[in-house]
Image (spheres, grey):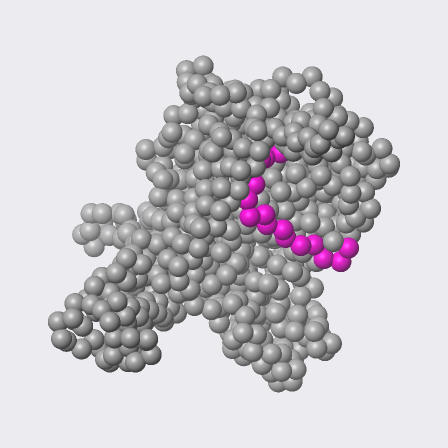
Amino acid sequence: MAEAHSAVAFSFAITHEGFDINYDQEVLNLVWNSGVRSWKKRLARARNGVRNGVYPAHIQSLWLITAIAIGLHFSGFAVPFDLVHKILVHLPANTINWQVTACFGAALIVWLSICFTMRYTLKLLLMYKGWMYESRAPGSKVSLRTKVWAAFVKILSSWNTPGLYSFQGSLPRLPVPALHDTMQRYLRSVRPLLDDENYARMEGLANEFESTIGKKLQWYLTLKSWWATNYVSDWWEEYVYLRGRSPLMINSNFYGTDAIFMNLTNNQAARAANVVYLLLGFRRLIERQELQPIMVQGMIPLCSWQYERTFNTVRVPGLETDRIVHYRDSNHIVVLHKGCYYKVTIYFKGRILRPCEIQVQMEEILNSKATPLPGEERLAALTTMNRSKWAEIRNAHFARGVNRVSLNLIESSAFVLSLDDEPFEFDLARPELLDKFGKTLLHGNGYNRWFDKSFTVCVGTNGRVGFNAEHTWADAAVMAHVWENLVMDDATTNGYDESGIAKGIPEFQPPSPTRLSWDLTVLQPQIEEATLDASKLINDVDLRILVHNQYGKGFMKKCRLSPDAYIQMALQLAYYRDAGRFSLTYEASMTRLFREGRTETVRPCTIESAAWVKAMEDDNTTNEERVKLLQKACDRHQLGYQDAMCGRGIDRHLFCLYVVSKYLEVDSPFLNEVLSEPWRLSTSQTPHGQTPKMDLKKHPNCISSGGGFGPVADDGYGVSYIIAGENLIFFHISAKLNCKQTDVHRFGENICKALADIRAMFELHFKSQGETNTKNGTASTKPNKAKLVK
């Protein structure tokens, strides 16, 4: 109980001699500094709120307009609309002081009018999405309309340096697509998956839905879109994530890996210290809103709403629905090592601890001889349970006493850090090492990750790092941005000396990590049950991380095709060869061009892609026919991706119509069937280059191998890929081992074969083009280059 006694900062006692006051000055100083820090943050939020409210105008421009108003008034000229005199009528007197006050009031009115005119002009401009469709067309010219639009957007968006949330008020709302358009897009998307009889049946259901209950549901959804900031995001978060009762591990959480070609240090404590410091620096950028919003083509902003919950966030289990809890501030992290939990203070004496000081704390934990308390080692297995079961246990055993205090410390921490007791290895000659690396991050041993936290940073004994992230609070692109920034900063700040330890000399002895206390004796059966259930999930999932280094986006761009569309078509061909059929395919796209936008589904299995795949398997089809069919399939895929990004997708609209039908207690056979269709091939591209710091020419080894997730369907594959360079692609392939129809290694081989066949097809095409050009007197055999947007 020594830790509890040392935590008492103030005591008051009454004796026969009077009263006695005892206090710990150092602890009271900590309390005082914490309060000062909290108020500074509140003032900063208020200042940023004003700045964001008037963006793109400058706050300082108010004083300029005030000076002009005073100059005009006292020079005998009338301020526009005679505002000064109109205000003076309502003031107590006509003295100089009150005239200056009236001038300020008139200037404020004019200034606010200008601010909101600029803001809503920018909002109207950002509603235009024609630029996206034009920029994707190879060799096409940009229309005059788009050029004029781009010029105005460039002027307004660069008028002032934006903060992280400066564009939030200018982003347009996500539009509700026309019901008829969504029905037609849906029917077109399922045509290659259904025979004539089933397609006719589905077409009848769609037409019946559109002409009957669909109109009513659409009206309610339109009404919501007028009232809510985003008609999808709140329902998507609640019904897809928070109301899901399945375990988070594997089923929902995702992972990300280190830059595997880079080895900054082999010292676990030093790497952990630098990672913690850099992540806290990123947190400060978010809190101060100094992080620059991501701008498409340098001028079109993406919504930054999801960044707010990156740190100090936890998903709390509930009996029927979970909830996301975000803490305003946290001055500690929780470290998990060999089954023991430690609270580590990272803010001390008015500043964030430096890497060399954090390393002292990490070494103290690594060198500790402490052993876990009964039940403590496998405690985190509770976060892998069915959400309702975990909620029952939490309510019964963590609502009071030391368990409540310790659980609150975990949940309110900035993030959780796991110091693993195994290395994270990579060797191109031994691909199984990278597979193991991915599995360690995806699920660990089932109890060395706190799966409820927004993310857990994992550090291997050899200094390599990775993360496991909860999915509710944000999409993978946000966490990828955090991680990309971390990797680049870690590589460029030169934070390690020659021996691999963190540079610098501690200015003081940092606060020692403190063990969390638990009383888990009565919880042993539940923890054991959770551990067994987690082991079953772990033993049933297989993961393959495929390193494809034969070629990358360089060759794809030579083919004048979008790299994403190119890979998606390769996946269609690979899956057809693997399963012998086409399947409903999910590709995640983003809708962050709209306020509070998250994701939309692109359906890569199209009529055009199916025609190309069949042509690839048909020996009677010529090579030139195959090339033309692939180009058509990629064009169709690009159109689907553009539609999804512009709010014209299929699945989020149908999902929201389904939610409305449930609220109205109306049964729809069409929606029931659509929402129950399994996604046997679920894919996602990990973005990179979200930070301007990412320069692979200067730092070619800084590229991460991306990350992955578990399979969505029991008889399907989960595929995440990252186009890591001109000649490098990583594929993260997952599947269930108990399914005899899937095999991650076989599917990986099919992906490699599909990519090789496409390359051979285009090389033959280029060769035939070269021969044709030679006959026509043209020397060059290279295709014309086209500018492509990612």
Residue 614 image point, x, y percent: 54, 58
Residue 485 image point, x, y percent: 43, 39
In this rendering, does residue 769 appear at all? yes
- Which residue is the extreme one toward the top? 499
The answer to whether 292 appears left or right of 641 in the picture is left
Q: Residue 611, relative to residue 28: is it above or below?
A: below
Q: Report the front residue among 404 and 439.
A: 404
Q: Report the front residue among 413 and 711.
A: 413
Q: Residue 485, relative to residue 477: is it above or below?
A: above
Q: Residue 625, relative to residue 424: is it above or below?
A: below
The answer to whether 235 appears left or right of 279 in the picture is right
Q: Give the residue at x 76% y 58%.
A: 320
The answer to whether 111 appears left or right of 577 in the picture is left
Asked if the stretch drawn in magenta spans residue 334, the answer is yes
Residue 481 image point, x, y percent: 46, 45
Residue 43 image point, x, y percent: 44, 51
The answer to whether 358 appears left or right of 689 in the picture is right
Q: Give the residue at x 75% y 50%.
A: 387
* Res. 23 image quadrant: top right
Q: Give the residue at x 74% y 41%.
A: 404
- What are the residue bounds of the magenta stretch? 319-335
